[in-house]
Amino acid sequence: MADQATAWQLILNGDAALFAIVRLSLLVSLSAVALAALIAMPLGAILALTHFPARPVLVVLLNALMGLPSVLVGLAVYLLLSRSGPLGEMGILFTPSAMVIAQTILIVPIIAALTRQTIEDLWLEYRDELTAMNVGPLGRMAALLWDARFSLMTALLAGFGRAAAEVGAVMIVGGNIDGFTRTMTTAIALETSKGNLPLAMGLGLVLVVIVVAINAALWGTRAWADREAG
Amino acid sequence: MRAPTSDLPLVLDDVSLDAGGTRLIDRASLTIAPGAPTLIVGPNGAGKTSLLRLCMGLAAPSSGRITWGGRIDCAPTRRAIVFQRPVMLRRSAAANLGFALGQAGVPRRDRAKRIASLLDRVGLADLAQRPARRLSGGEQQRLALARALARDPELLLLDEPTASLDPAATRSVEEIVLNAAQSGIKIVMTTHDLGQVRRLAGDVIFLLRGGVCERRPVGDFLDNPAMPETVAFLRGDLVI
């Protein structure tokens, strides 16, 4: 109980270190979601609307990659960005940029796979109308992505949940440097191993509250959208 | 005087359509030329919807040949279709029309005016900003008609547009169809309603088991049918 009281105190007193960590975590994960959405949504839509021999393989692969272990992504990005790696000259290993890259790679398969499913279902419904309106391939993609916009929020949410909760990738490519690349999850891991349970629990609580709040906001948006757009 | 890109006449030459081992359309030949509305009647499963899909170019014939204004493989720029259950885009009524106008190549600056006039034409001016999928069945059917008219078609195919509507909604749809016909659009429409045939048709195609059983001007069809199957159908017997 005492530990919990201290955790709450840290939050209520506006502990500067804690808020810096929260801020960085949100910045990294939200950037990764935005970047991944730009890549994954068109990718998912293309997979939904095209037919080529390797398509089933890609679809299965994409679905499988949804469960990609985050440490593996961390390792791959580490190898890419390390001094002797192919992208070593960029010098961004152990920076927030590297963490954004790693989390983007981690969640592109999630958003792409969910987008593909959503767009494929909507296409079945829209196919005849769009074909009759002589809509070309790019126009189809744009129309379907736009009309699926509220369903696709679920995909973004799944991506954000994964990014905000993972610890393996950001730990490896960020390095958990105090005040620079320390996120909520890496800090929780560190503080727990140090035995500083109040801070660990405070961070844990904040993480849960943020994830619940974002889910609630999106759920509210969807409910509103269902009423408005049908 | 016909424009070089005209879709008419639409000619089906010995066309068959097979799907999943079933023959949906069986060696149908017919010509759709400009003129009064052509109504297609026939029992369920006679192939009315399949015939419209072929006419629209949504289905390719398994054998035979379809030409629009003499051309094969003609993109649907001068023809439009309203499905029996039209699918509304998840946008406002006005945005549904805006999308169709955009696809038809209408410049952005002209769209607002066209949208307003189309909504007015189908009596939905007050519901412009309403989400299309929140409209009633009759309103959706009228919006679908407006969306088809937005493409400025020469040929308008309608698949039982009043099938599930009450008399008032049916009447407003029929008025829109008649107005379109009077403005020079060739209407080809399927129906189950012989009263509707009398009200709208110039000529009638009786479709049976995927084939054209009889095609005649509406007066002859209703009062003086040639085929025994047509006689039985008009009498209300179950023709299969």
Image (cartoon, rainbow, N blue to C red):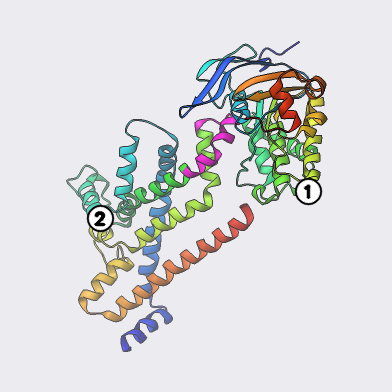
Q: Main secondary structure of the magenta part?
A: helix
Q: Residues within 10 Å of mark 2 (few under 14, many from 20)?
A: few
**Residue for point 59% across, 60% down:** A224
From mark 1 to mark 2, how far is it between C-alphas? 54 Å
**Residue for point 63% across, 43% down:** B88
The answer to whether dots 1 and 2 both sit on one chain is: no
Numbered disc 1: what chain? B
Corner quadrant of residue B10: top right
- Please report the bounds of the magenta region as a residue range: A121-137
* Residue B164 placement (x, y as % from top left): 70, 43
Vertical placement of residue A202 versus B164, above or below: below
Name the residue type under label 2.
Pro
Vertical placement of residue A35 versus A135, above or below: below
Name the residue type under label 1.
Asp
Residue B126 - label: 1
Residue A69 - label: 2
Q: Is residue B39 visible?
A: no
* Residue B53 placement (x, y as % from top left): 59, 27
Corner quadrant of residue A169: bottom left
* Residue A48 placement (x, y as % from top left): 43, 39
